[in-house]
Image (cartoon, rainbow, N blue to C red):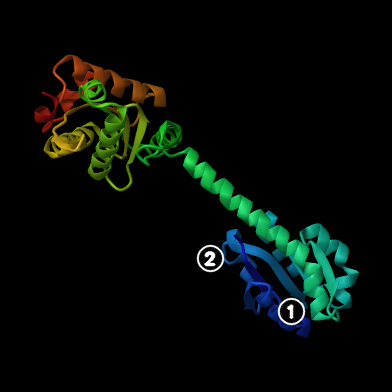
């Protein structure tokens, strides 16, 4: 919940006195000598219930600060209360149109100031609380419930963004589609609960195999996708080989007993200057996966096959 209040430029005594009332109300009060704090890149609007501004300076500059602050992400839900002398009262219309929510005279008693401010600060707290809840919901909607990895929806977004970036900067992008060999047997022999456990364990293995800036997502069932930015076919095949070895060396727990598993990997790449859509990139990796399934499983295949010939040092991973 947003529970911070900034008091900027507290030249008027009422602002310093009001700070005590606000602290008693449970707000964390931050005092700053300049309005420029509102434009500080390190200031997070997500924890702000409101801002109290002491007006005393160049009106045009102050109006510009307010306008720039309102343009910041999340700032629309932060109430701004301005306290000033006759100059502020005469120009109240300009301040309100620039983004201030309330203009009060500097000779107002501190208790009255806080009483007038409370509804705005409660609104700010509620706004930030709802924004945080919405952020958490958005994050949850992008995560797979079973593994905690990105889900198909998040993968699709990452895929589109990375394909566009790869084209723009002229770098390679590779995709690996992988699933567990004979996974149906686990569900049939041990039940879906044990199958879910295996999927979680397998997701952890893939997550350990990837680079820090790669994306590994669960597409559904026992199928996973791995997006490798700035990885050409050879590098992608080596990455798949590393993951294949890690899977083969891992011991999975199934119904309380150790179990060895294998997996098949399909790899494709988007190369600079080659017109290939995001769907084509994933589709080619999917074709390579099914080719691997049809020719022995526990293997790695690259699609289209002719591309593999240009990738020295990868033969041990595709045979």
* Disc 2 element: loop
Q: Which percent across, then down, holds residue 281?
A: 35, 25
Instruction: Give left or right: position of 290 versus 89.
Output: left
- Mark 2 nearby-residue class (10 Å; few <14, some 14–19, many ≥20): few
Q: Quadrant of the C terminus?
A: top left
In three-dimensional space, the C-alpha distance between marks 1 and 2, rounded to whole angstroms, equals 25 Å
Considering depth in this image, is 175 or 249 the residue closer to the camera? 249
Q: Quadrant of residue 240?
A: top left
Q: Residue at x 80, y 78 (%)?
A: 111
Q: Which percent across, then down, holds residue 146?
A: 37, 37
Residue 59 visible to the viewer:
no
Instruction: Give left or right: position of 60 versus 177.
Output: right
The label shown at residue 42 is 2
Label 1 or label 2, whichever lies nearer to me, is 1
Q: Residue at x 66, y 63 (%)?
A: 49
44 to 161, vertically: above or below: below
Considering depth in this image, is 259 or 116 the residue closer to the camera? 259
* Disc 1 element: helix
Q: Quadrant of the N terminus?
A: bottom right
The label shown at residue 18 is 1
45 to 158, vertically: above or below: below
Q: Which percent across, then down, holds residue 157?
A: 46, 35
């Amino acid at each position: 919940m947003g529970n911070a209040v900034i008091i900027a430029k507290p030249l008027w005594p009422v602002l310093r006195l009001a700070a005590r009332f606000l602290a008693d109300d449970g707000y964390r009060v931050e005092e700053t000598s300049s309005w420029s704090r509102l434009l500080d890149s390190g200031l997070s609007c997500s924890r702000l219930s409101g801002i109290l501004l002491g007006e005393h300076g160049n009106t045009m500059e102050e109006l510009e600060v307010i306008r720039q602050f309102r343009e910041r992400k999340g700032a629309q839900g932060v109430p701004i209360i301005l306290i000033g002398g006759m100059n502020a009262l005469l120009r109240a219309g300009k301040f309100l149109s620039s983004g201030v929510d309330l203009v009060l005279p500097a000779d107002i008693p501190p208790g009255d100031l806080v009483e007038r401010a409370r509804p705005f600060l409660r609104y700010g707290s509620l706004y930030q609380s709802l924004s945080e809840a919405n952020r958490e919901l958005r994050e949850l909607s992008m995560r797979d419930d079973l593994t905690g990895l990105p889900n198909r929806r998040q993968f699709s977004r990452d895929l589109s963004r990375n394909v566009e970036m790869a084209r723009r900067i002229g770098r390679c992008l590779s995709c690996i589609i992988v699933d567990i060999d004979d996974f149906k047997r686990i569900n049939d022999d041990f039940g879906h609960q044990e199958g879910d456990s295996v999927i979680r364990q397998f997701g952890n293995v893939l997550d350990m195999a990837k680079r820090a800036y790669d994306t590994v997502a669960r597409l559904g069932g026992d199928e996973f996708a791995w997006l490798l930015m700035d990885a050409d076919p050879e590098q992608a095949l080596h990455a798949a080989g590393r993951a294949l070895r890690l899977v083969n060396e891992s011991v999975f727990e199934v119904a309380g007993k150790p179990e060895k598993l294998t997996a098949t990997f399909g790899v494709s790449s988007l190369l600079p200057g080659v017109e290939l859509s995001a769907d084509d990139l994933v589709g080619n990796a999917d074709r390579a996966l099914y080719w691997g399934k049809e020719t022995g499983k526990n293997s790695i295949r690259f699609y289209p096959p002719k591309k593999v010939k240009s990738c020295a040092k990868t033969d041990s991973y595709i045979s």
